[in-house]
Image: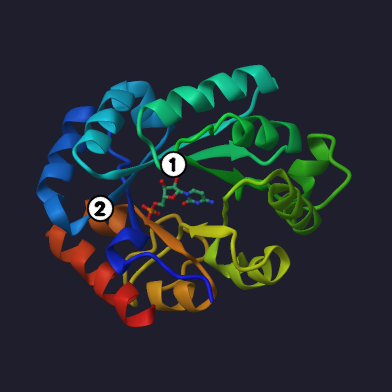
Amino acid sequence: MVSKPAARDRLIVALDLPDVAAAEKMAAQLGDSVAFYKIGLELTYGGGLGLARDLAQAGKKVFLDLKLHDIPHTVARATTQVADMGATFLTVHAYPQTMRAARGALGGSSLKILGVTVLTSCDDSDLAEAGFAFGVKDLVARRALQAARAGVQGLVLSAEEAQAMRALVGPHMLLVTPGIRLAGGVVGDQKRVMTPARAIAAGADYLVVGRPVTQAPDPRAAAEAFVAEIAGAG
Ligand code: C5P
């Protein structure tokens, strides 16, 4: 049995907000209710790397969702920079060469690499158009196994894929799942959603939640509701 982190550490709140000022305000409002934040490309290019550093220095965990993919030398150097910032998770596209480069650059840091197998915006025809000989299902499985072989520590995937993926990659790979909603919550543009309890039961280690917390009338209460459900499920 692999031991799981505390419930509060398993909730990752996506700071998908237009600018750093709004993200800082949200983090201040959430206070101790949230221990782990995800910063994506939009906020990163809007000055979010400074915020990532500040959050890490304030004792928060930071997931930099940068989806790196470049020549190995560049991926390795970028990974080192992210590790030096004190981030906890970094995403890379799950190409074997890219994953090996990021994994090899971790040194003694506590940064963990998460592979993004196939973007959920891609279907079989998108992959064919891009020149791949595999459909989504086969490419996800192939890349998940390659991630395990490359020694990356985790995968980002929909909660619906978690159970099958867990069977494929074993108990030690961290499974990080977005598309999480409390029962009866607003789904928004997510096509497939799962409750925290069901995602945990399916094998998810960490849950990424954005709008249900950041757009709630009381974000702190919303975060506490997610933590409580994770605690009850874990
Ligand atoms: O607001 P919501 O809870 O839907 O946000 C989910 C977060 O997870 C967003 O930052 C989104 O970009 C990210 N994500 C996702 N689906 C994926 C990968 C990432 O929703 N397949």
Instruction: Report the mark closest to the observer, 2 or 1.
Output: 1
Q: Is residue 154 left or right of residue 229?
A: right
| Label 1 secondary element | loop
Which sits in the foreground, 101 or 130?
101
Q: Is residue 6 left or right of residue 125?
A: left
Q: Residue at x 37, y 67 (%)?
A: 181
Q: Is residue 92 left or right of residue 222?
A: right
Question: Residue 105 appears at what percent x and percent y?
Answer: 58, 29
Kindly identify which residue carries mark 2: 35
Q: Is residue 153 visible?
A: yes
| Label 2 secondary element | loop
How many other residues sit within 10 Å of disc 1, few (<14), some (14-19) or many (≥20)?
Answer: few
How many other residues sit within 10 Å of disc 2, few (<14), some (14-19) or many (≥20)?
Answer: some
**Amino acid at the residue labelled 1:** Ser
Question: Residue 34 appears at what percent x and percent y?
Answer: 22, 55
Cα distance in 3D space between marks 2 and 1 = 16 Å
Which sits in the foreground, 5 or 212?
5
Q: Residue at x 11, y 43 (%)?
A: 28
Kindly identify which residue carries mark 1: 110
Q: Residue at x 66, y 65 (%)?
A: 165
Question: Dividing the image into 4 quarters, which one contains the N terminus?
Answer: bottom right
Q: How many numbered marks does the figure carry?
A: 2
Q: Is residue 190 above or below residue 196?
A: above
Question: Residue 233 appears at what percent x and percent y?
Answer: 38, 80
Q: Is residue 172 above or below residue 210?
A: below
**Amino acid at the residue labelled 2:** Ala
Q: Residue at x 66, y 67 (%)?
A: 170
Q: Is residue 219 visible?
A: no
**Mark 2 within 8 Å of ligand 1, using the beta carbon:** no
Question: Residue 107 appears at what percent x and percent y?
Answer: 53, 32
Q: Quadrant of residue 85?
A: top left
